[in-house]
């Protein structure tokens, strides 16, 4: 099947549909289930689907109605194996633009492991697609995050989510709204679910040890997802090194400074300033004492 699509070029489908691919059109493939039944290789469905997913221009799969699906309980087994994760259709170029206003997302804790996520459409007068995303990383990128739910509605709706472990964990959620061509709005405001206490406000704490000779630990806390930057400079404002410069999730964190500048050179003994910023806002500055 892969050979017919891509592997047996120049006699493959990929050779003849390049104009459509270049135009950004959607393409689906349809594995012939009846052939797998006839040759007694029904269980090859999974490997065929996974191989098709490796072809860049395959966007999805098309299906015909086969009696063998009923006999083999295809939809149940496929839905719990190679089709068990949610996916969205990529936007097609040249079609309508997405709504300008993102939907709203509200998180309501139910207990220590359970929380409800309520999506509120920006325009309640017309139906639209809503895509709810989740990430356990330090940021939520719709192109990389897990899709929790895809809903078609104009009414607010609620999805219940449960932590699968009692271990310390944080999950970020966001939602977009998409039109009929799957053009998405910008991500909504991110909400955070956590099994650990979230700080009330961001802070930069006293380093330890202080004074120090060698390495010191600098604790800091984040109360909401944000871009964090932590710099060390001299008291005269000369920049020494950037210790943190990335998106951070809510919680308590720490970073170490080894007394070296960005070129890897040892700093001389003295008083230095460590400063934490969230965006353009200075959260806190503290003095470090380096002794050689």
Image (tube, rainbow, N blue to C red):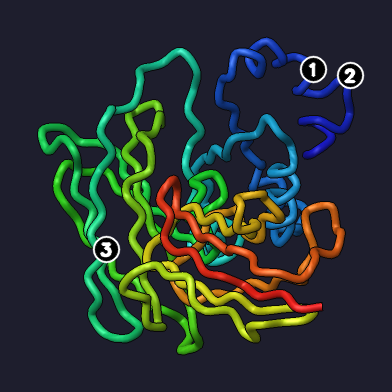
Q: Residue at 65%, 19% (x, y): give it.
A: 21
| CA separation in Å, label 2 and label 3 | 50 Å
User: Is residue 104 visible in this depiction of the protein?
Assistant: yes
Please state the horizontal and vertical placement of residue 178, each as a whole percent of the image: 34, 35
Residue 243, by quadrant, is bottom right
Q: Residue beneath label 2, please? A: 10
Nearer the N terminus, badge 1 or badge 3? 1
| CA separation in Å, label 2 and label 1 | 6 Å
Q: Residue beneath label 1, please? A: 15
Quadrant assignment for the N terminus: top right
Between 254 and 88, the one nearer to me in the picture: 254
Residue 55 to residue 254: above or below: above
Q: Residue at 76%, 31% (x, y): give it.
A: 5
Nearer the N terminus, badge 2 or badge 1? 2
Between 61 and 289, the one nearer to me in the picture: 289
Between 253 and 104, the one nearer to me in the picture: 253
Q: Left or right of 51: which side holds 271?
A: left
Nearer the N terminus, badge 2 or badge 3? 2
In the picture as drawn, the residue positioned furthest to the left comes out as 125
Quadrant assignment for the C terminus: bottom right
Q: Which mark is residue 117?
A: 3
Please state the horizontal and vertical placement of residue 271, each as a whole percent of the image: 65, 69
User: Is residue 71 visible in this depiction of the protein?
Assistant: no
Contact (CB < 8 A) between labels 2 and 1?
Answer: yes
Residue 261, by quadrant, is bottom right
Contact (CB < 8 A) between labels 2 and 3?
Answer: no
């Amino acid at each position: 099947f892969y050979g017919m699509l891509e592997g047996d070029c120049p006699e493959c489908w990929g050779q003849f549909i390049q104009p459509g691919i270049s135009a950004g059109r959607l393409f689906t493939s349809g594995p012939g289930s009846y052939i797998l039944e006839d040759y007694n290789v029904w269980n090859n469905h999974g490997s065929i689907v996974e191989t098709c997913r490796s072809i860049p221009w395959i966007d999805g799969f098309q299906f015909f109605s086969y009696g063998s699906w009923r006999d083999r309980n295809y939809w149940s087994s496929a839905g719990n194996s190679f089709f068990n994760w949610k996916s969205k259709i990529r936007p097609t170029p040249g079609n309508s633009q997405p709504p300008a206003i993102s939907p709203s997302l509200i998180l309501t804790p139910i207990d220590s492991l359970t929380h409800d996520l309520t999506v509120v459409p920006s325009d309640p007068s017309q139906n639209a697609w809503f895509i709810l995303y989740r990430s356990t990383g330090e940021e939520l990128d719709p192109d990389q995050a897990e899709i929790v739910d895809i809903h078609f509605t104009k009414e607010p709706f609620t999805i219940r989510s449960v932590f699968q472990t009692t271990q310390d964990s944080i999950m970020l959620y966001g939602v977009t709204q998409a039109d009929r061509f799957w053009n998405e709005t910008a991500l909504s405001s991110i909400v955070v679910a956590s099994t650990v206490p979230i700080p009330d406000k961001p802070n930069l704490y006293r380093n330890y040890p202080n004074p120090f000779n060698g390495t010191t630990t600098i604790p800091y806390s984040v109360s909401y997802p944000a871009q964090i930057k932590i710099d060390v400079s001299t008291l005269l404002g000369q920049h020494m090194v950037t210790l943190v410069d990335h998106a951070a999730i809510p919680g308590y964190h720490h970073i170490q400074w080894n007394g070296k500048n960005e070129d890897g050179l040892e700093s001389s003994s003295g008083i230095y300033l460590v400063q934490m910023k969230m965006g353009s806002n200075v959260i806190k500055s503290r003095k470090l004492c380096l002794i050689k």
